Amino acid sequence: MQTFMPNRCPGRLIVVEGIDGSGKSTQVSLLAQWLRLRGYAVAFSEWNSSPLVRETTRRGKKKAMFTPTTFSLIHATDFADRMERYIVPLLQAGAVVCADRYAYTAFARDVVRGVDRAWVRNLYRFALKPSLAFYFKVPLEVALGRILGGRAALKYYEAGMDVGLSRNIEESFRLFQGRILAEYESMIEEMGFHVIDATKSIEAQQREMRRIVRAQFGPGRPAGVLGTPEVSVARLHA
Amino acid sequence: MQDYTRRPPLSYYQTPLPDVDYSELQGKLIVIEGPDAVGRSTQVRGLKLWLEELGHAVLDTGMARSALAGKGIKEAKQGNTLGPRTMTLFYTTDFADRLENEIIPALRAGFVVLMDRYIYSIMARAIARGENRAWIERLAGFALVPHAVYYLRAEVKDLITRVVVGKGAFDYWESGLDLGFGPEMYTSFLRYQARLIRVFDQLAVPYGFQVVDATQSADQVFHELKTSIATVFEAQPEATPKKAPAASKAPRVRRQVNVVASID
């Protein structure tokens, strides 16, 4: 069974994935900036950001109402709304949509929460297949150091406290992220991730991403891509 | 197609929920299904009173009533910006929340759970809106297989009278206006509801629906439902071995009573 629907739109979908603290958000902003300067119309879509679903998710999180199944379903609802009303129309218009986390996040997290692997894959079968999916590979301790070093308290679901791995929130976060990491690693080949070594310098990672994007997008901008017509394709390859 | 009519004990269709021991579910799950305005709620009200008179503890629940997603769905429907797939998933979230937090605890405590609509309504609406049937069937695969599903069946022409006389107006979503099944509301209602009925008809055999002619009077329908539901209670005598020891069941029952009380 195919995992996703083929993208028949003129636009391109770029996805970044990885555990918290892998640096993917920094990298995707740099990539978007670079694409914009080259005349592409670039849009962003973040995981768990649909205004239609926000209140329900907030209520569920605040009162710790979620089970693994409802947690999985509400995130899929959020994703469907962004897909229907935002991502697909933009791709139809020819934009480059950069998604910070995609269905793979659900594949990793929901399975760690105990949701059936085949069921959650089916749940996201309506998602469009990304043109490129980058996976930011980072050792657990490095990511934990980045997260736990300089930020406010961890949140209940973020730390996977609902999974019951540990009563200590920091320990729970470590164990939870470790399991998610293992799920990502097992998906690399199946999902055709472009693996970025996230222990390298920010600049080195960005160079690698741009190289892959150039190779994938080819010599011309995809038909229908928005942007100023005078921007030459050559600049992407410059 | 699997035989989904196997029962009891209660089980799931395709995918078990995490952390549910299905052998603990002692109660009965009875579903009233059918299109909009076919008279389901009237029957559910009557059946609840009747079952309580017989001494059964009854939990009645219906769509978009979950603590988690009920409010969100109502708000989302106000704006008319809810896409068909988002709607399917939002309703499935609502269903899962009620299943895990109300229905399963009530069944564990030995309640009769009487459902005004079930996962089949979510499936039918999705399929009528062009969704892939295999996708929605697998998605809904965590639902429990009910002891009985009654499909109140009527044609669109019968529903129109009920809508006009009963509600006095056509509803945006019940008319399928989100996808514009017709040039205006009335035509859209006719086409969408006709399609919905055809989908229910297709689900009837694989999901073991018992078809009830809803063009009869409400009293006749009620009588037919009572006669059939009575057999559900005969089907499983007290002799059935129960796994959970009585001692461990008592606190659960007390806890569930609170849950049920908060629903009304």
Image: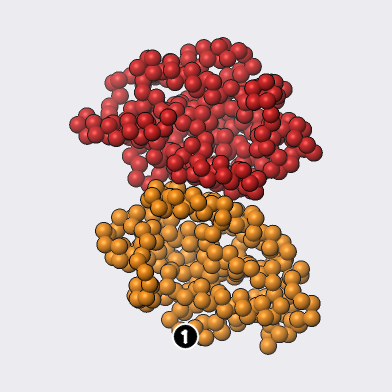
Seen at 44% across and 28% down, the residue is: B60
Seen at 34% across and 54% down, the residue is: A162
Looking at the rendered structure, the secondary structure element under dot 1 is loop
* Horizontal relation, residue B59 to residue B207: left or right: left
Can the viewer see residue A140? no
Q: Which residue is mark 1?
A: A201
The image quarter containing residue A100 is bottom right
Identity, as a three-letter code, of the amino acid under mark 1:
Ser
Out of B150 and B23, give the one closest to the viewer: B150
Drawing shade for chain A: orange
Out of A88 and A150, give the one closest to the viewer: A150
Q: Position of residue B215 (x, y in %)?
A: 64, 16
Name above or below for residue B154 compared with residue B195. above
Q: Position of residue B264 (x, y in %)?
A: 42, 29
Seen at 56% across and 55% down, the residue is: A51
* Horizontal relation, residue B41 to residue B239: left or right: right
